[in-house]
Image (cartoon, coloured by chain):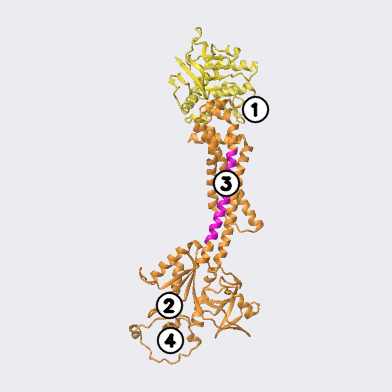
Amino acid sequence: MDLIRLDNIHKVYHLGEVDLPVLKGVSLTIDRGEMVALTGASGSGKSTLMNILGCLDRPTTGQYWLDGEDVSPLNSDRRAMVRNKKIGFVFQSFNLLARTSALDNVMMPLTYTASHLSDREARKRAVDLLNLVGLGDRLDHHPSQLSGGQQQRVAIARSLVNHPPLLLADEPTGNLDSHTSEEILRMFQRLNAEEGITIILVTHDQNVAGHAKRQIVMRDGLIESGFFNAPDVKPPPIPALRV
Amino acid sequence: MRAVVRTLKTATIALRRNVMRSMLTCLGIIIGVAAVIAMMEIGHGSSTAIQKSIASMGANTILIMPGTAASGGISWGSGSTMTLTPDDCDAVIRECSAVRNAAPIVRARSMQLIYGNHNWIPQQITGTTDAYLDIHAWPIADGASFTDRDVRNSNKVCLIGQTLVRELFEGQSPVGKDLRMGSVTFKVVGTLVAKGANMMGGDQDDLVLAPWTTIKYRVSNQSSGGIAQSNAGASSSAASDSVNTLNQVYPSSANDLYPQLSTVQQADTPKPVRFINIDQILCAATSGMAIPQSIDQVTAVLHDRHHIHSGEPDDFTIRDMTELQKTMTSTTTLMANLLLGVALISLIVGGVGIMNIMLVSVTERTREIGLRMAVGARSRHILWQFLTEATILCLAGGALGIVLGRGGSLLVRVLLNWPTEISIPAIVVSVLVSAMVGLLFGFYPALKAAKLDPIEALRYE
């Protein structure tokens, strides 16, 4: 079953008098449990597609099914709820709250929807995730007391706190050295393999893209290659999330 | 509920992240509220002091006069009938909540006072109770006031004004000395503080105060009602036995012109009972504002006591000090408006400060807002977070401001000796207003934050 299905997505920006088409009819499916790299030169529409995939933006025309739900017509508040429940974000610059402990950073997304969770449950969930990314001993550290790789791992824990089926990583290793990058990519692979989380890596780095099972290459607002699943990859059965 | 708690928590965490900025933001409100509280307390104190001094001029007094007698189309002017009794005065004190105190007044015509080889005719000889001093806020300079017991026993004691002290006693202490008023000897028990001239230029210190019973029954059986009284006193020996009258001073009524009446005869032919009337009742309302209310209450009580039905003419008239009262009211209003103006200006300045810093804060935290939106915060979450932050800042600033303002007004009282007065409404209002300022001036920045586009906010450098 596919987690993501894009059907003939167009995105046109209106810059004053001029219409600037950025996506010109993108169709795409991504199954559950896949690990996909979205690559392309700058200006290819990669970021725009990522924003639409992340429900941060709406397509001008076309339909987008995420987890069986058509999210393309939703208004911004409904999209915010979809983002909260179904999508975890990892950014190039980590985007952690300064002067806030790792634990509070991880718990932050729970503020907005998880009112069914008690404070203790929320805390337990965050601690478990920090343990999962190997930072169980740094719960009270502030971002400034953590290395880049550790910060990115806190960000990954934060992105997983609502148990989303989809993790969207935008240049996750762009600010890291090659050794740490490798560590982080391994972690993505592990999460993908062990937790069954669908991961989309948005990158222009071929080395990073190589860690994914499938590469989608964008060019001039269209997908150049990688429409389909590589034949040798079997989507694993969806295991329950361990944490 | 949990969402509210989490919003509060998020806001406090965000404020704690930048303590210095939070403190600086608060400062505007702290100073604003402190200024409001201090100004209110100092102003309130001054206002009360001013009101008190105007009140001591008689601004909140009302005067109840007996009604007008008219015969053959000629009106004899106010005070020409005798309708007020000491019981009326007691009833007014007892039943009128807007009346702070009331004193009966009996006036005697001026007569010569003699002490040693000095003599003087005072402008006023007034019989009253010691409530008179309370109503006029007139302190005793030396000695003590006469008491209720002196009034009951018509003791021959008196208080004198400073003019008399100067003229009769040449400035020496008159307390304990005896002076003579006509044929009656009075012991001076105290002197009154100098008041100077009244608004019409009359000397207020040129007076003698004595128990009204003494003035009425010992000094002036000629005061209004004196004829009726002396008739009654002469004819009804049963009544005159109970009160000291001039009959004892001049025991001249030696032989009865008429034979004694038996009890049955007395019951069959009722004689006019000695009519204890007083000339005026002086009342003090609880405040200048309460004067109309106290007039209404006094009217109702006297209607009831005098059996006057609605529509019938009153047998009394009530006067108030309209001019002084107007002065007092306008002074109070002026003070209140002045304080309000100062309060508003300082709070608005504080509010603008909050808005400034919140706007800076929104710009500075654009990425955080973008991130929060990306992980699922809806616009209203962002709006509420910033509103809550602004409100918390304002309330905290308000609390600190109250403490500071109280401290300031205390300092002023201790160091400068100004009268200050704690003002509970000022505290309540400034807390409410500071919360309002937080909401009002926090709203624009919060709205700006809530309207950010998450994509651009995330990309913001």
Do the dots labelled 3 and 1 sit on one chain?
no
Q: Which residue is mark 2?
A: B82
Tell me the distance, in whole angstroms, between the alpha carbons under discs 3 and 2.
60 Å
The amino acid on which the numbered mark 3 sits, given as a three-letter code, is Leu
Disc 3 residue crowd, few under 14, some 14–19, many 20+, Cα 10 Å: many
Image quarter (top left, top right, bottom left or bottom right) of the C terminus of chain B? top right
Disc 1 residue crowd, few under 14, some 14–19, many 20+, Cα 10 Å: few
A160 versus B262 height, above or below? above
Q: Position of residue A3 (x, y in %)?
A: 46, 17
**At numbered mark 2, what does the secondary structure look like: helix, strand or loop?**
loop
> Is B273 on the left or on the right of A120, as rendered?
left
Tell me the distance, in whole angstroms, between the alpha carbons under discs 2 and 4.
19 Å
> Residue B315, can we see it?
yes
Rendering colour (chain A)? yellow
Q: Which chain is orange?
A: B
Q: Which residue is mark 4?
A: B234
**Residue farthest right in this picture:** B415
Q: Which residue is mark 1?
A: A144
The amino acid on which the numbered mark 2 sits, given as a three-letter code, is Met
B347 versus A38 height, above or below? below
Q: How many marks?
A: 4
Tell us which disc is closer to us: 3 or 2: 3
The amino acid on which the numbered mark 1 sits, given as a three-letter code, is Ser
Disc 4 residue crowd, few under 14, some 14–19, many 20+, Cα 10 Å: some
Q: Which residues are magenta?
A: B329-356
Q: Which residue is mark 3?
A: B347
Disc 2 residue crowd, few under 14, some 14–19, many 20+, Cα 10 Å: many
Do the dots labelled 1 and 4 sit on one chain?
no
Q: Are marks 3 and 4 in contact (CB under 8 Å)?
A: no
Tell me the distance, in whole angstroms, between the alpha carbons under discs 1 and 4.
108 Å
